[in-house]
Image (cartoon, rainbow, N blue to C red):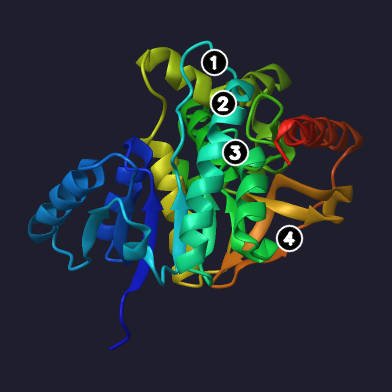
Amino acid sequence: MASRAKVTVIGAGNVGATTAQRIAEAGLADVVLVDIVEGLPQGKGLDLAEAAPVVGHDAQVIGTNDYADTAGSDVVVVTSGLARQPGMSRDDLLMKNAGIVRSVVEAAARVSPEAILIVVTNPLDAMCHVAHRASGFPRERVLGMAGVLDSARFRTFIAQELGVSVEDVHAFVLGGHGDTMVPLSRYSTVAGVPITELLPAARVRALEERTANGGAEVVALLKTGSAFYAPAASTFEMVDAILRDRKRVLPCAVLLQGEFGVHDLFVGVPIVLGRGGLERVFEIELTSDERTAFEKSAAAVEELVQKLPA
């Protein structure tokens, strides 16, 4: 029988630990939880391992401070970094998290040179650039998790608004992960019917705005810390698509090389996600308004990338 896949999750905070829990409990892969804080990943790893007999899976979960234990990983998920605090912009996080992401990716890539990287740390699109440079990996193997989460939030709000099952709601969100993201309502559907046919324009606009501010809404309610259940679930969906080679069409941040008229910039677009990571970009037609919004979003990402240390 083939050995189980191996996934490393860097950062044993709420997002990392919850992602590790989902991967292990699905029996999808053995998980190594790595963190700079001594005892934290070991404690959470042991706690998760002790849940296995109850949940009924045989995936191994270990915690470590040593990247040697992560060697040979199929997927490396990067969640380490500072979480956004109330009143803190994503830009405030930029410099601090760039340094953290660079060092952890260099360490992980050294021992897992064939891995696929999934970046979760904010500001997401800029951190993908840091990870891409630090790893030296091809663009197919460096992906940002944001669009899946943003789409999930949009789907949640649409389903609540219309009183329908979230399973029948599909939503499309493009662009950077932040205030300039572009929820594409024309391509967002309930059982195949665009929501623009089902809701007045003002309600659609309100749902788009709530989606763009989805992370900040949770931060404001929690007072300390930020969202982690939905981000972890969204990260799991990407890991699952890769390890099971499911060819899912999901919105992810990838390095565009001419698609959508954007060059050398990580921006969220729909892609086919499988065992090779990014298998192709789904280029869809945009109206002039949507294109303007997308270009504005890409420009906001570029502005952050320009601030990154070379």
N-term mark: 2 or 3: 2
Which disc is residue 13 wearing? none
Q: Nearer the viewer, mark 4 or mark 3?
A: 3
Relative to 251, 281 lies left or right: right
Pointers 2 and 1 in contact (CB under 8 A)?
yes
Q: Quadrant of the N terminus?
A: bottom left
Relative to 127, 31 lies left or right: left
Residue 105, x across and y down, in percent: 52, 53
Residue visible at 80% across and 52% down in the picture? 284
**Secondary structure of the residue carrying numbered label 2:** helix
Q: Amino acid at mark 4?
A: Val
Mark 3 — residue? 124
Residue visible at 31% across and 75% down in the picture? 4
Residue visible at 9% across and 54% down in the picture? 50
Does any portion of residue 150 appear in the rendered image?
Answer: no
**Secondary structure of the residue carrying numbered label 4:** strand
Q: Amino acid at mark 1?
A: Met
**Secondary structure of the residue carrying numbered label 3:** helix
Mark 2 — residue? 93
